[in-house]
Amino acid sequence: MDLNKSFPCIDDLERATLRRLPRFASEYLRGGIGREVALVNNRVALDRVRFDARYIPNQDPGPVDLATRVLDQDFALPFGISPVGLSGLMWPRAVEILAKAAAKADIPMGLSHHATTHQSDFHAIAGKNGWFQLYPARDDDMRRAMIDEAIKTGFETLIVTVDIPGLTRRDRELRVGLSVLPRLNYETLWQVATHPRWALAAAFAGPPQFKNLLPYRPKGLSAKQQVEFFATFMDRPVCRQVLCDIRKQWPGKLVVKGISGMADAKAARDCGADAVWVSNHGARQLDAAPASVEMLPAIRQGLGTGAEIFVDSGPRTGLDIARMLASGADFVFLGRPFIYGVAGLGARGGDHAIHILREELRAVLVQLGCSRPADLSGFLAE
Ligand SMILES: Cc1cc2nc3c(=O)[nH]c(=O)nc-3n(C[C@H](O)[C@H](O)[C@H](O)COP(=O)(O)O)c2cc1C
């Protein structure tokens, strides 16, 4: 099959995913929180960012070079893969497929603390392109043990996600009966039976498990209590003191994810973060959250030109990546688009999603007359 013809853009991969997945999985993946105002605004705010092309430049800008250096590491592209929990529910071995694609394309990928793949298996595939994402446990000893495990595994970059201070309530997930893991009942069984491709793949893989959390689960819990543990082990705000303690313990690069305002950006920097990651968690946590792209200019101005700023939440095209880079980000991450790739296409989906975004981004830079991602801000329309 010619993937470029059948799936020329990420929206095509999303449509393929929605056809393939049972509803409990697709609702978990695509949904936002509340009335999904923030989800819509993530799109609307990106569409507002416009560029002025230079069709008559003073000199030839030369060939486009998308290589980008962040956290003292060189990457082939200025975008990477956000951590997505429970991705094994959307497609078995989604993490492995994406880790392989990330290593091949030389882009970074964050492994979710809620992943269904063990961190050592991920690290073996992704190598230096693999970063570990941590939800700091409310129990200090447990948190330190989890960080020690990430150090032992060999990760060099730790992403600390701060924007889930308590239990999240999402209407779509409640409606389909998803509470951390799907509940088996007539309705979910019917959804599985009517999506045979997913059912077959899932049957081979077995039920998804939170492999990086299993060792910390207290002994003797019932199935219901275990689910509760997975949902609540981190239900406490990540206070400054905790962030500073993590900084002291973690020897590598530290990235703080879930920044949506200047106060948190400064707090993260003051605690010693090497980069801040502006995000509204794909509009899954607060329906009144600003779109990341709206926050970028102020955070760039507040932190200054030397700070490293990453961003996610909303981009679906290479043009969107360019919009975020032009608005103040050094590096852009995407969550759902890569899962749409894998859930829609299986093993080829990671490579194809990266291919789409790379070629779209390259075309935008050529069209603008811009040769490097770092120069995009000079092309923003007034
Ligand atoms: C299904 C799903 C699960 C997610 N799980 C995690 C997670 O475990 N850890 C985390 O830091 N962010 C998680 N996120 C947020 C993503 O890392 C990222 O911030 C978000 O997907 C970006 O928005 P986008 O999907 O519009 O690209 C999740 C997002 C989705 C859609």
Image (cartoon, rainbow, N blue to C red):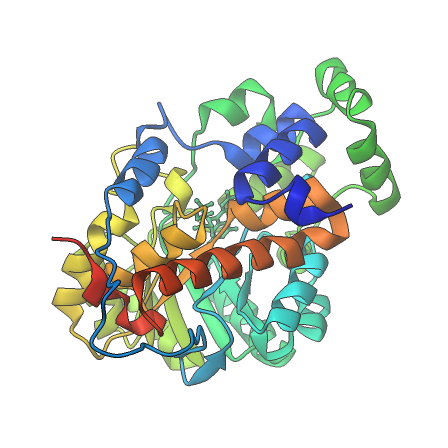
Picture quadrant where residue 262 is located: bottom left
Q: Nearer the viewer, residue 326 or 229?
A: 326
Q: Nearer the viewer, residue 191 or 46?
A: 46
> Residue at the location (54% across, 70% down)?
107
- Specify whether residue 153 is in view: yes
Going by the image, does 352 lie left or right of 306? Answer: right
Going by the image, does 367 lie left or right of 3? Answer: left
> Residue at the location (56% across, 57% down)?
112
Going by the image, does 110 lie left or right of 253? Answer: right
Picture quadrant where residue 276 is located: bottom left
- Residue 109 location in percent, x, y? 55, 65
Q: Quadrant of the N terminus?
A: top right
Q: Nearer the viewer, residue 336 or 11?
A: 11
Picture quadrant where residue 213 is located: bottom right
* Residue reaching furthest to the top: 186
> Residue at the location (58% across, 50% down)?
338
Q: Is 220 placed above or below 296 here?
A: above
- Specify whether residue 221 is in view: no
Q: Nearer the viewer, residue 298 or 246?
A: 298
- Residue 298 location in percent, x, y? 14, 58
- Residue 113 location in percent, x, y? 56, 57
- Residue 93 location in percent, x, y? 74, 53
Q: Is 64 placed above or below 261 here?
A: below
